[in-house]
Amino acid sequence: MPKYDDGLPFRVSQQLLRRIMRKEFPPGTVLPSEREIGETYSVSRPVAREAIKLLAARGLVTVHPRQGATVGHDLTGAAGEALLLAFHQADAVQADLLHLRLLLEPQVAGLAASHATFAQQRRMSIIRQHLQTLHAALDADDFERAHALWPQTDQPLHVLLGEMCQNAVFKVFVEIINTILWTNTQEVIPEMSKENLRIASNHHLAICDAVLIGDSEAAHAAMVSHLEYTRDHIFSRHNQLHELIQIVIDA
């Protein structure tokens, strides 16, 4: 009996991954069947099955019983988990992420102001409308509604700024860094107060306004102010931010 090559499923999975990256299998499409994969790469169906399982374990595809494996729409999640693990193994702390944001995101905001498309500006205008609604809720002492609106304006704004740079790496990296930081700080920082929410949303309004009029310097400065406030707020609420970045596993 020939010896089983336990590295074969991995090599087949890498071949499939390259085809996903080349967009031969766009998000939402179904991968070839185990039989087709076996014929293409001259491997057995069990090897093809293990190759698909490896892709599924990395969050790149979803396996549906009797329906095949579907390429995921959100492939940044897998990248984020890998980066989070790398941060953890390197003994990175939450303060390191805040410092990285201060180096990266003001530049992103400046570039966004000069590179945003009309369609992207319209999306930012919608976020700005949510910010105005949030402020109206604060003025009406409806803190519960204001707090509920915050997720529609916080991370979406930062990710959109990354997209506005017209650099796909910026968009993905900003999204991943914000997700990691948000997940970790949620574990240790209490809910934002009314004052915190008003100040942070004012910073967001200033960023939106600068980007919408194409003022790169003002966008850069507004982002610095926002991130410095965010850093100081988090440090003031939690004196152990130099703890290791935690890996959060959904039960």
Image: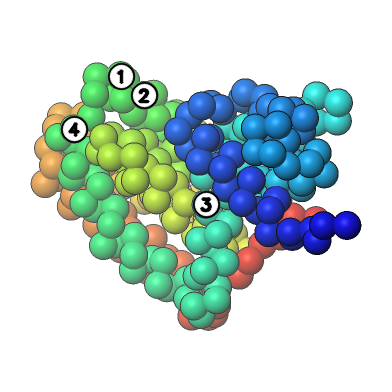
Residue 143 visible (yes or no): no
Under mark 2, the amino acid is Arg
Tell me how far mark 4 sits from mark 3, CA to CA. 26 Å
Residue at 62 percent across and 42 percent down: it is 60
State the residue position of label 3: 79
- Give yes or no for contact between labels 3 and 1 (Cβ–Cβ under 8 Å): no
- Give yes or no for contact between labels 4 and 3 (Cβ–Cβ under 8 Å): no
Of the residues tagged 4 and 2, which is closer to the observer?
Answer: 4
Under mark 1, the amino acid is Ala
Residue 119 is tagged as 1
Instruction: Reply above or below: 250 against 210.
Output: below
| Mark 4 residue element | helix
For this rendering, which residue is in front, 42 or 218? 42
Residue 232 rendering spot, x and y as whole percentages: 37, 69
For this rendering, which residue is in front, 214 or 72? 72
Rendering quarter of residue 4: bottom right
Rendering quarter of residue 25: top right
Under mark 4, the amino acid is His
Tell me how far mark 3 sits from mark 1, CA to CA. 27 Å
Under mark 3, the amino acid is Ala
State the residue position of label 4: 115
Instruction: Reply above or below: 154 against 95.
Output: above
Say whether residue 239 is left or right of residue 190.
Answer: left
